[in-house]
Image: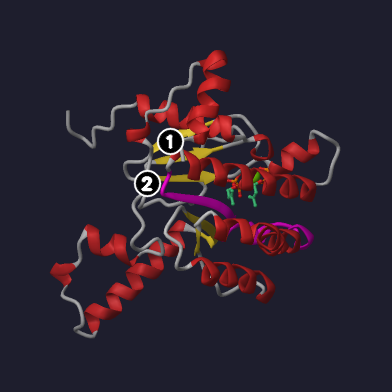
Amino acid sequence: MFHLFKRTRSDLEREEAFELMPDNVPKHVAIIMDGNGRWAKGRGLPRIAGHHAGMKAVKRVTIAADEIGVEVLTLYAFSTENWKRPRDEVDFLMKLPQEFLSIELDELVEKNVRVRMTGWKEGLPAHTLEAVEKAIERTKHNTGLILNFALNYGSRHEIVQTVRDIASEVRQGELKQEDISEELISNRLLTGALPDPDLIIRTSGEIRISNFLLWQMAYSELWFTDIYWPEFTERHLVQAVCEYQRRARRYGGL
Ligand code: IPE
Ligand code: IPE
Ligand code: MG
C-alpha cells in the first residue's frame, strides 16, 4: 500500500517536495475528469481520441488512489447534460465502460477494488449497463477501494428525485415530516452510504462544478488544475492530496 508513497517520495520529493502524510489521506476523492476534447484538438486528433486517452488516466489514477490509501474514488464520467453532445460522441462514450472493464476488470478484482455506479441506469444503452453491472457484481464481495463511476449523473436531478421520494413517503404516512434530517437526505441520495467527498478535483482549467455532487460537497476541499484529463497522472493526484493535507478544514468552527 505504501509503494506509491515510496515511489513518490523518491521520485517527486527531489523535484517538488511532495510529502504525503499517511494518516491524513482523504477518504473520498471525487474527480471531474475534464478536457479530453481539448487535449485531442491540441494534437489534431478527433475528440474521441481524447476520451480514449482519458481511459488510461482512469487506470493510472485508480491504482494510485488505492496505493495512497483513498477509500472511495468517484469519477465523473458522463453527466445528465452530456446527452446534448453529438450522437457519435455519445455513442463512443457509452462504449468506453465496456472497453475499460473488458481490459481492466480482472486486475480490479485482483486488487480487491469494488466497482460501483452513481447515476441513472435508465437511459443507458444495454451494452453499457451490462458491462457496469457485471463489474459491480464481480467485485461486490471485495473490501478495498470503492471505484465509483458517476455515469448518467446530475446532482439537481438527484435532489429532485430524492425530494419526490421523501414527499411521497410523508404523504403515505411512512415518514414523519419532522424526521427529515440532513442525515436522512444524505442517505436517500444516490451516493447513499458513501461518505461525502473530502477532496474534489477538476482538470482542464475550468473553475466550475457542472452539476456534480452539490449536496455532498458542502465541506469538500476543491482543487483545480489546468492539466487536461488525459495528461493527469499519479503525480497530480499526489500533488492534490498534498495540498489538501495543508488545508485547515474548519467546518465553520475555529
Ligand atoms: C471530459 O472531457 C469528458 C466528458 C465530459 C465526458 P470533455 O469531452 O468535456 O473535453 P472538453 O472539455 O471538451 O475539452
Ligand atoms: C463535466 O464536464 C462532466 C464530466 C466530466 C462528465 P463537461 O465538459 O460536461 O462540463 P461543462 O459543460 O464544461 O460545464
Ligand atoms: Mg468538458
Tell which of 110 and 92 is nearer to you: 110
Q: Which residue is rendered at x = 74% and y = 37% of the image?
A: 39
Q: Is residue 79 magenta?
A: yes
Residue underneath mark 2? 217
The residue most toward the top is 14
Q: Which residue is rendered at x = 40% and y = 70% of the image?
A: 161
Is residue 208 in view from this perspective? no
Q: Are marks 1 and 2 in contact (CB under 8 Å)?
A: yes
Q: Type of residue at label 2?
A: Met
Local packing at callout 1 (Cα closer than 10 Å; few below 14, some 14-19, many 20+) is some
Snapshot quadrant of residue 33: top right
Q: Quadrant of the C terminus?
A: top left
Q: Position of residue 113 (x, y in %)?
A: 50, 56
Q: Which SS class for mark 2?
A: loop
Q: Position of residue 239 (x, y in %)?
A: 50, 27
Q: Position of residue 243 (x, y in %)?
A: 43, 26
The residue most toward the right is 44
Q: CA distance from mark 1 to mark 2?
A: 9 Å
Q: Type of residue at label 1?
A: Leu
Local packing at callout 2 (Cα closer than 10 Å; few below 14, some 14-19, many 20+) is some
The residue most toward the bottom is 172
Tell which of 193 and 188 is nearer to you: 193
Snapshot quadrant of residue 194: bottom left
Up-down: is 14 above or below 124?
above
Q: Which SS class for mark 1?
A: strand
Tell which of 240 and 165 is nearer to you: 240
Task: Give the residues drawn in magenta, as a range.
Answer: 70-89
Badge number at residue 222:
1
Q: Earlier in the sequence, mark 1 or mark 2?
A: 2
Is residue 205 in view from this perspective? yes
